[in-house]
Amino acid sequence: MKKTFKKLIALTSAVSLTALSVAGCGGSSQTSADAGKGSEQSQAAAETKVETTDAAASQDTSDGTDYTQGDKITIKIAHVSQEGVPIDVASKKLGDMLNEKTGGRITVNVFPASALGNNTELLEQLQMGTLEMAISSVAFLGAFTETTKLLDLPYLFQSNEAAEEVLDGDVGQTIFENLQPAGFEGMAWLATGWRHVTANKEIHKPEDMKGLKIRVMENQMHIDHFNALGASAVPMAFSELYTALQNGTMDAQENPFANIDGNRLYEVQKYIIKTGHIYDTSPLLASKTWWDSLSESDQKLIRECVNEMVTYERELSASNEAELEEKIGNNGTNVVITLTDEERQAFKDAAQPVYDKYGPEIGEDLISQVNEINQKYVK
């Protein structure tokens, strides 16, 4: 386990989203936030409390189980993104559902904005059993299983539907199973948006990337990807990005619309090129030590509520993404460029060296399974 920690601590990147004001269902979930660490978003969040109401629905489920009976359970869910983003709102909704179905026996406290630590620290807490659940970045899990690198392959997915079928099916389950020996119980794959390139010049083909200094996360696969396109990929802290784009230290960057909007990157980048090179997903993980201590009945209930929460979060994330694209595209200053299928394929072809390098360690069989599912959604 010590070696695992060392690998994990060596990783340095973060995940973030922009704040979205959406009211959650009434319940007893709570939120605590302090100054964040290691997030790709603003690290400050005010401590808030979600008002609670008595559950009005029946606490007996359709199978007749009375979930009000049993040990009291408090679940802490931590993440590094700002309060109010879809994963945060959905986490509170999970708390509402569990509180209602158990008559308050199971409660959830949500800690956004790195209030309990950065991604590395949250994963360590899961391993030690001092934290029940965390929403992490895939980029931090490669130290535990090479299969997570599958999700960092560029242009892997063709649509939301294909990505969700892959993650909810055998491929996603295989990744979760490979994380169990490290002390993680995979619960669900949440959506955080497609990653797109922004620049101050139009980009329609890989050749347009030649010589551009593009900021990327501290992720070797991301670095290799953009270098393969002819750009010069430079890892940089997210907190330094706006200034670097403003003064010309960096020419371009890549992020989901949520980050482009939340950190006002559109002010210093005219063009948003919808490369959709990565479908950003954030796994909801539980401490296996804690999970194994629960009764089968409570495990069943929690999984049922998590499944409902995932559907809600993905719909909220997709809606948020569409609204932000429209907002930025219609502001009179920025231009959103949608690549044709042929243009996007040219980018994928240029990124083939990434597949050649990482395919064998990820598993060609997993990549083939993804490609088969993608074909089902080709228009």
Image (cartoon, rainbow, N blue to C red):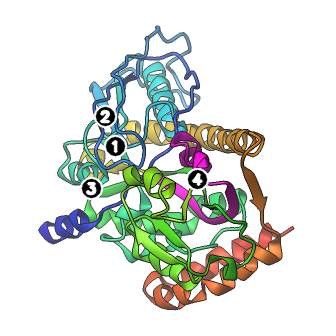
In the picture of the structure, the residue carrying the numbered disc 1 is 133
Alpha carbon separation for disc pair 3 and 1 = 14 Å
Amino acid on which disc 2 is placed: Lys
In the picture of the structure, the residue carrying the numbered disc 4 is 256
Circle nearer the viewer, 2 or 3: 3
Q: What span is in magenta? A: 257-283
Alpha carbon separation for disc pair 4 and 2 = 27 Å
Amino acid on which disc 1 is placed: Met
- The answer to whether the residues at label 4 and label 2 have Cβ atoms under 8 Å apart is no
| Position above or below: 353 against 240 | below
**Disc 1 secondary structure class:** strand
Labels 3 and 1: the sequence-earlier one: 3
Circle nearer the viewer, 4 or 1: 4
In the picture of the structure, the residue carrying the numbered disc 2 is 76
Labels 4 and 1: the sequence-earlier one: 1
Quadrant for residue 235, please give it.
Answer: bottom left
In the picture of the structure, the residue carrying the numbered disc 3 is 120
Amino acid on which disc 4 is placed: Pro
- The answer to whether the residues at label 4 and label 1 have Cβ atoms under 8 Å apart is no
Q: Is residue 190 left or right of residue 83?
A: right
**Disc 3 secondary structure class:** helix
Q: Residue 365: in sight, yes or no?
A: yes
x, y (%) of residue 331? 74, 39
How would you rate the neighbour count of disc 2 (Cα within 10 Å): few for under 14, some for 14-19, many for 20 or more? many
Of 155 and 134, nearer the camera is: 155
x, y (%) of residue 52? 43, 11
- The answer to whether the residues at label 1 and label 2 have Cβ atoms under 8 Å apart is yes
Q: Quadrant of the N terminus?
A: bottom left
Q: Is residue 265 magenta?
A: yes
Alpha carbon separation for disc pair 4 and 1 = 24 Å
